[in-house]
Image (cartoon, grey):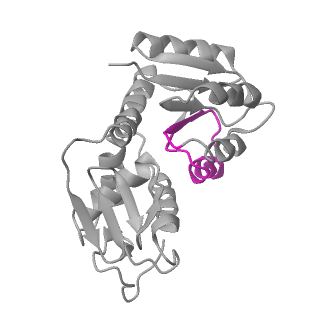
Amino acid sequence: MKPNVIFVIDDDPDIQQLVTAFLTHEGYIVRNAFNAVQAFELLAFEEPDLIIMDIQMPDMDGITLCNAIRKQYHRPILFVSGTQKQELKALSLQSGGDDYIGKPFDPEDLILRVRANLRWSNLLEHPPVKGTKLEFPGLDIDLERMTVMVNHQPISLLAKEFQMLVTMASKPNQVFHPRQLYRQVWEDDAYYSKDTVKTHISNLRKKIEPNPALPRYIITSLRLGYKFNPYGVVEPKATSE
C-alpha cells in the first residue's frame, strides 16, 4: 500500500524537525514548507493526503493560507499552534481546518490525530465496494461513493463534515451531546471542545441547509445537543446554535 504523504507547514525549524521525525518513524512521507510561498510551490506539484500547518507564520497567517488552499484542496488540514486565543482556534476551523491541536503537544497525541484524520480521508478516496444510501426529502447521502446531494445537486463536504453528517443521519431524531459527536467523529475526547463541534455544525449547515438560520436537517435540541431531522422541514422553535 502506498504510504500517505503529509505536508508540514511551519516556520519553526525545531517543530519541523520534531514532527517530521515522528511522522517518518510512522511510515509517512513528509514534505516541508516554512512559509506560504513554499506551501503553494509544493501543492503545484503534489497533492498530499493531509496538511499540518501553524497559524502564525511570517508571510501569510495560517487562516488566510487555509482559505486559499481550500479552493483547490479538500483533504484534511490539521492546525498545530501555540496561540491560546479561542477566537483564532474558531477561525482556523471556520476557514476549513478539520482539527486543531495546541503547542506544546505530546507527539503520540499528534500521531493519533493524524491517523484519525487520514482514516476518513482514505475512505473518501477509496470507498468500500458495497454500501447503502441514506435518503431524506431533498437530501441523499451515498455511503458507497461517499457523496452528498442536496436537491439533486452535488455538495462538497470535508471529511469531518461528512463523518458528522453520517453519524447523525444514521440515527435520526437521536440527540447527540457535543461531546458524543466529538468522541465519534474525532475518535477521542481528550481534546474535546464544544466550540470545535459548534463550528463544524455551522459549516455543515451552510452547505446542506437551504437556510442555515432555520435549519431543516441539523436541529439544536433544547440546547442539549444536536439531532438529525429526517423529514427535511423546519421544526417549531428550532434554533441554529
Q: Quadrant of residue 141?
A: bottom left
Vertical side of 136 occupied by 170: above or below: above
* Foreground pick, 237 / 162: 162
Q: Position of residue 125 (x, y in %)?
A: 38, 38
Q: Position of residue 26 (x, y in %)?
A: 39, 15
Q: Residue at x 45, y 27 (%)?
A: 110
Q: Is 240 positioned to the left or the right of 10 in the image?
A: left
Q: Is residue 19 at least partly visible in the picture? A: no
Q: Is 164 positioned to the left or the right of 200 in the image?
A: left
Q: Residue at x 65, y 38 (%)?
A: 83
Q: Position of residue 215 (x, y in %)?
A: 44, 77
* Foreground pick, 107 / 173: 173
Report the span colored magenta: 74-99
Q: Quadrant of residue 80?
A: top right
Q: Quadrant of residue 133?
A: bottom left
Quarter of the picture holding the N terminus: top left
Q: Is 66 positioned to the left or the right of 28 in the image?
A: right
Q: Is residue 229 at least partly visible in the picture? A: yes
* Foreground pick, 98 / 134: 134
